[in-house]
Image (cartoon, rainbow, N blue to C red):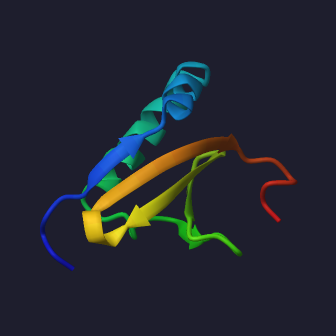
Amino acid sequence: MSNETWRVVVDASVRKALDNIPLADAEAITVALAGLATNPYAGDIQKLKGEEAWRRRVRSYRVEFRIYQDMRTVLVYELKRRTSTTCR
C-alpha cells in the first residue's frame, strides 16, 4: 500500500452525532476517523454484507464508510451506537 494519505469526508449527520455523544467516545471516534486517512483498512473493520461499504467498531459505536480507491477517498456516512441488534 502506498504511503500517500487518503482524503476522509465525514457526512454532516456524523459530525452532528459526534456532538451528542459522551466526550470520551467522541474523542476515540475522532482519532479513529483521523486514522482512516493513513490506512482505511486498519483497525477492527469488516465489510458489510450486500453493500460496497465497511464498518469499524470504536468503543460502543459503529462507524460505517465507503472506500473509493480511484479517488483515494473515504466517505464516512453513518455513526451508530452498538446494541444487540447492530451486532448480529
Task: Determine whether 77 is above or below 20 in the image.
Answer: below
Residue at the location (27% across, 63% down)? 71
Name of the residue lying farthest toward the top? 19
Q: Is residue 12 left or right of residue 62?
A: left
Q: Is residue 74 left or right of residue 16?
A: left
Name of the residue lying farthest toward the front? 70
Q: Depth check: 54 or 45 in front?
A: 54
Count of labels in the image? 0
The x and y percentages for residue 18 are 53, 27
Task: Determine whether 88 is above or below 64 in the image.
Answer: below
Q: Is residue 72 left or right of residue 26?
A: left
The x and y percentages for residue 30 are 40, 37
Q: Depth check: 27 or 50 in front?
A: 50
The x and y percentages for residue 40 are 37, 64
Residue at the location (52% across, 65% down)? 44
Viewport quadrant of the N terminus: bottom left
Residue at the location (78% across, 60% down)? 87
Q: Depth check: 23 or 8 in front?
A: 8
Viewport quadrant of the C terminus: bottom right
The x and y percentages for residue 42 are 39, 68
Name of the residue lying farthest toward the left? 3
Task: Determine whether 42 is above or below 23 in the image.
Answer: below
Residue at the location (73% across, 47% down)? 82
Name of the residue lying farthest toward the bottom? 1
